[in-house]
Image (cartoon, rainbow, N blue to C red):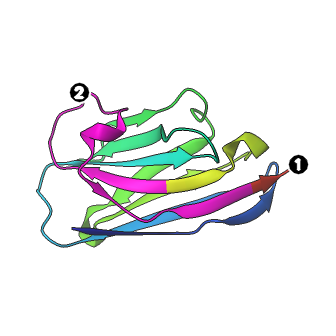
Amino acid sequence: VQLQASGGGFVQAGDSLRLSCAASGRISSSYYMGWFRQAPGKERKFVAAIRSSGQDTYYADSVNGRFTISRDNAKNTVYLQMNSLEPEDTAVYYCAIRPRDSNFFLRQSYAYHYWGRGTQVTVSS
């Protein structure tokens, strides 16, 4: 399984960005796709996740109400719409797949088996 993230960039506070992550290879029919982010010198943190059905979504408190995760199963692609960006959102954003239909430990990076390379998001004040 390979994941390719894109859409990062340099923006001003208050702006929006949309990240995309396309998955290829043999993927279980039931799985979660998630986004994590890692700021310089800090640990990787959960941002959002979505179930394969698209009906269940989960967000970190810090982004809830500003970010929206969605997916297009026909394209094996997950999106992260990021609005009202803040300088604190600056990080490398990674997409990942949890190839199990279980929400246990969904906010933990060790629950995900496949990772993309990441895309840089920089928000200037």
Residue at (65%, 58%) from the top-left corner? 121
Residue at (24%, 31%) from the top-left corner? 103
Residue at (46%, 46%) from the top-left corner? 36
Residue 7, image x and y in percent? 57, 69
Characterize the local packing of mark 1: few (<14), some (14-19) or many (20 or more) Cα atoms within 10 angstroms. Answer: few
- How many callouts does the rendering have? 2
Label 1 is placed on what type of residue? Ser
Magenta-span inclusion, residue 17:
no
Provide the secondary structure element on which disc 1 rests: loop
Residue 39, image x and y in percent? 62, 46
Residue 104, image x and y in percent? 23, 27
- Label ID, residue 55: none
- Label ID, residue 125: 1
Q: Earlier in the sequence, mark 1 or mark 2?
A: 2
- Work out whether 22 lies above or below 41: below
User: In the visual, does 87 lie left or right of 19?
Assistant: right
Provide the secondary structure element on which disc 2 rests: loop
- Work out whether 45 lies above or below 98: above
Label 2, on which residue? Answer: 104
Characterize the local packing of mark 2: few (<14), some (14-19) or many (20 or more) Cα atoms within 10 angstroms. Answer: few
Residue at (77%, 45%) from the top-left corner? 87
Residue range of the region highlighted in magenta in the rendering: 94-122
Pick the residue in front: 26 or 65.
Answer: 26
Q: Residue lying at the far right in this picture: please name it.
A: 125
Residue 65, image x and y in percent? 60, 34
- Work out whether 50 lies above or below 114: above
| Alpha carbons under labels 1 and 2: distance apart | 36 Å
Label 2 is placed on what type of residue? Phe
| Image-quadrant location for residue 10 | bottom right
The quadrant of the rendering that contains the N terminus is bottom left
Magenta-span inclusion, residue 108:
yes
- Work out whether 66 lies above or below 74: above
